[in-house]
């Protein structure tokens, strides 16, 4: 595969950041889709794209597109990703992958049957420090408690309180804290500990949507609390507590950009990574596609499906 040409669906903030990251790591930005053609034309000019569309079928008929990036509201992920795959396009699918594991499994089956790529674009999956963190966790001995808290006051919360209905707080669009922020910490917990033996979910609701919530994950001898909130000003962090010491994740556990290890024997050290989180994930995806490392892709895809099952179990407990 030579040049990998990408079409962007949506002109949201996350779509714009992702487009910039893709371009910076070597993808060819080819086209943009928006219901508002004027916005699409503005995006096209910003990124010097070849084409702007307001019709999805027309975009999918474009032979110069290899990948479709789906940066739309959560409830639209499955529909637009499925249509892209059925039209022979690989897909970069924003988190949360789909609304449930059933949708995700169907997308996987379509992609695999056609040897297409299907990636969940979530920064947690691709952070360089994750492998090192997994090794350091083993030094803590038996672990009895982990806390991963990704919370921040949403830029849309005041609008929501005023009686408006932004997508991120709209239950009909798959909004809410657990799907928006909690999915990151569920990914981290799964990466470190695998599938829990039991889950329990607690949430604060307003107008039918969770504005802050906690997923209690039970493992043998250990509790992991995955906390997320969009309705309060606070500091995000992570802590992993073992019999031989503890690890502190500085800042959002969605990124794992910096962490400290403190052992019972007095030894302490830290690691940090200052590379761009968005560029990290697209750099990994591009390398996999260029090498056609399909088994590596399937490993990442299976992990996304497992975390979707975990999210299903958490939300069903409500």
Image (cartoon, rainbow, N blue to C red):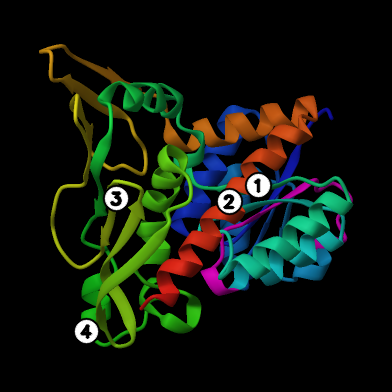
Badge 3 or badge 4: first in the primary sequence: 4
Residue that mark 3 sits on: 224
Q: Nearer the viewer, mark 3 or mark 4?
A: 3
Taking depth in this image into account, of 190 and 28 the one nearest to the observer is 190
- Label 3's element? strand
Q: Which segment did they paint magenta?
A: 59-75
List x then y, in percent, for residue 202. Answer: 26, 72
List x then y, in percent, for residue 317. Answer: 39, 75
- How much space separates mark 1 and mark 2, taking CA atoms? 5 Å
Which disc number belongs to residue 301? 1
- Tell me: 264 left or right of 193: left
Q: Are marks 1 and 2 in contact (CB under 8 Å)?
A: yes
Quick check: 248 above or below 14?
A: above
Residue that mark 2 sits on: 304
- Tell me: 28 left or right of 127: right
Which disc number belongs to residue 162? 4
- Tell me: 305 left or right of 176: right
Badge 4 or badge 1: first in the primary sequence: 4
Q: Quadrant of the C terminus?
A: bottom left
């Amino acid at each position: 595969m030579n040049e990998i040409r990408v079409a962007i669906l949506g002109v949201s903030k996350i779509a714009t950041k992702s487009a910039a990251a893709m371009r910076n790591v070597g993808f060819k930005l080819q086209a943009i889709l928006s219901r508002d053609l004027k916005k699409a034309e503005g995006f096209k000019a910003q990124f010097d794209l070849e084409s702007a569309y307001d019709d999805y079928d027309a975009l999918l008929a474009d032979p110069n597109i290899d990948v479709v990036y789906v940066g739309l509201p959560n409830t639209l992920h499955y529909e637009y990703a499925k249509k892209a795959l059925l039209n022979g396009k690989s897909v970069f699918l924003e988190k949360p992958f789909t609304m449930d594991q059933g949708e995700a499994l169907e997308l996987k089956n379509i992609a695999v049957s056609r040897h297409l790529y299907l990636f969940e674009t979530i920064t947690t999956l691709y952070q360089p420090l994750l492998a090192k963190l997994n090794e350091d966790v083993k030094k803590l001995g038996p672990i009895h408690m982990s806390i991963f808290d990704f919370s921040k006051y949403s830029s849309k919360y005041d609008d929501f309180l005023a009686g408006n209905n932004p997508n991120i707080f709209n239950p009909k669009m798959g909004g809410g804290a657990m799907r928006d922020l909690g999915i990151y910490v569920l990914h981290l917990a799964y990466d470190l500990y695998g599938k829990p033996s039991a889950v329990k979910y607690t949430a604060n609701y307003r107008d039918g949507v969770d504005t802050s919530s906690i997923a209690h994950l039970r493992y043998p001898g250990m509790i992991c609390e995955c906390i997320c909130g969009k309705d309060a000003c606070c500091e995000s962090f992570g802590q992993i507590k073992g019999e031989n010491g503890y690890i502190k994740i500085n800042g959002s556990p969605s990124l794992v950009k910096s962490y400290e290890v403190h052992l019972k024997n007095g030894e302490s050290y830290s690691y940090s990574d200052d590379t761009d989180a968005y560029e990290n994930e697209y750099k990994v995806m591009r390398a996999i596609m260029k090498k056609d490392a399909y088994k590596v892709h399937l490993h990442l895809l299976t992990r996304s499906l497992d975390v979707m099952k975990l999210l299903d179990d958490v939300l069903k407990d409500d």
